[in-house]
Image: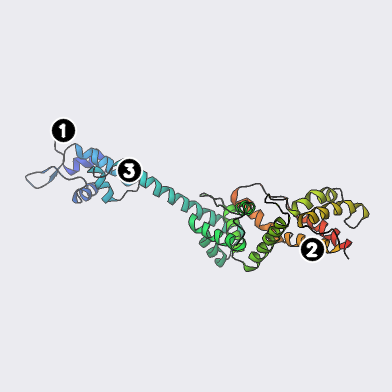
């Protein structure tokens, strides 16, 4: 093309593939201004208008608004800076759309009622900061006064759900259920009791180093007996029970007697609450962790063994 050649709107339309109406629209807004007018008053454009229109069309297809486009083509704004800002905006939109897709998939699979769908959508649409505040408020309530201890800071971290930016439907379902659980006063009271019991055991141990949780000790001792099919009421189970009650007696600084065994049975029943296990199952789904092994069978066996021996 000759740089001195002037083109009518019709000729510009043929060269760019845009309609005359579209070019006139951009021209009226000063984005692609005419260089001159013919004696009859028709607009005339130089070859530069072709390049500007090509850029305008590209930027419009990328979703930029007209005021921003005008600043870019007039070089009032840096194109890389504009592109970076819009890339971030698109990333946010993609995250929102991914979340909506996950909610809709969950609703379709779950057969949710309108009320459940509304709650699921509302909870899933919380921003990352809002989700953290919701979870943080729950954890602050159940760890109140204990979170400063190093051992409990680690426990708090192990109980913190982090929904990814692009969750799948299963993670959305798990997050919504976790959020509902965290607002349940009865569940909060249950978790608080477990944390207080753990804190008391750690305090009685007389050391700042975290001691093995009694549920873990019982699992290690009673698990093999359960797997072997040992009757918890049988004499063969006596050494197993003696092993984990001795651990508990040492942990809390009390003699291994019937009172201690009743206390331990109550402690294990508290830990064995199905809501606790459900929380950690959901937590693993949300965080993408391996599914935790169920403690329920071994705790059931251990509680039965303790109750038989303290009847």
Q: Against 18, is 250 above or below?
A: below
Q: Quadrant of the C terminus?
A: bottom right
Residue 126, visible in the rendered structure? no
Label 1–label 2 contact, CB within 8 A: no
Q: Which residue is mark 3?
A: 81
Residue 137, visible in the rendered structure? yes
The one of 3 and 191 positioned closer to us in this rendering: 191
Residue 11 position, x and y percent, is 19, 40
Return the mark for residue 283: none
Residue 168 position, x and y percent, is 56, 50
Element carrying mark 2: helix
Q: Quadrant of the N terminus?
A: top left
Decide if residue 52 is on the left or right side of residue 153: left
Decide if residue 51 is on the left or right side of residue 245: left
Q: Which residue is mark 1?
A: 3
The residue most toward the top is 2
What residue is drawn where x is 72% and y is 54%? 206
The one of 186 and 40 positioned closer to us in this rendering: 186
Give the distance between the C-alpha atoms of the residues marked 1 and 3, in whole angstroms.
30 Å
């Amino acid at each position: 093309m000759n740089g001195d050649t002037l083109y009518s709107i019709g000729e510009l339309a043929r060269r760019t593939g845009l309609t005359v109406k579209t070019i006139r629209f951009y021209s009226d807004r000063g984005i692609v201004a005419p260089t001159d007018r013919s004696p009859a008053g028709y607009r005339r454009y130089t070859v530069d208008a072709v390049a500007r229109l090509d850029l305008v069309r590209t930027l419009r297809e990328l979703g930029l608004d007209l005021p921003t486009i005008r600043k870019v083509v007039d070089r009032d704004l840096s194109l890389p800076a504009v592109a970076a800002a819009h890339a971030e905006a698109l990333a946010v939109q993609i995250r929102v759309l991914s979340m909506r897709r996950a909610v809709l998939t969950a609703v379709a699979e779950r057969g949710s009622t309108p009320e459940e769908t509304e709650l699921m959508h509302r909870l899933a649409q919380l921003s990352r900061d809002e989700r953290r505040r919701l979870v943080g408020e729950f954890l602050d309530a159940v760890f109140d006064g204990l979170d400063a201890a190093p051992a409990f800071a680690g426990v708090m971290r192990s109980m913190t759900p982090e929904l990814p930016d692009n969750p799948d439907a299963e993670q959305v379902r798990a997050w919504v259920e976790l959020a509902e659980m965290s607002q349940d006063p009865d569940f909060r009271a249950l978790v608080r009791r477990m944390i207080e019991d753990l804190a008391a055991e750690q305090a009685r141990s007389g050391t700042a180093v975290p001691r093995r949780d009694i549920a873990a000790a019982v699992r290690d001792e009673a698990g093999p007996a359960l797997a072997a099919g040992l009757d918890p009421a049988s004499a063969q189970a006596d050494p197993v029970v003696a092993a984990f009650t001795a651990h508990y007696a040492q942990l809390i600084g009390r003699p291994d007697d019937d009172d201690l065994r009743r206390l331990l049975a109550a402690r294990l029943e508290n830990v064995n609450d199905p809501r606790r296990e459900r929380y950690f199952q959901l937590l693993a789904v949300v965080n993408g962790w391996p599914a935790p092994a169920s403690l329920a069978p071994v705790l059931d066996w251990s509680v039965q063994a303790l109750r038989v021996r303290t009847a």
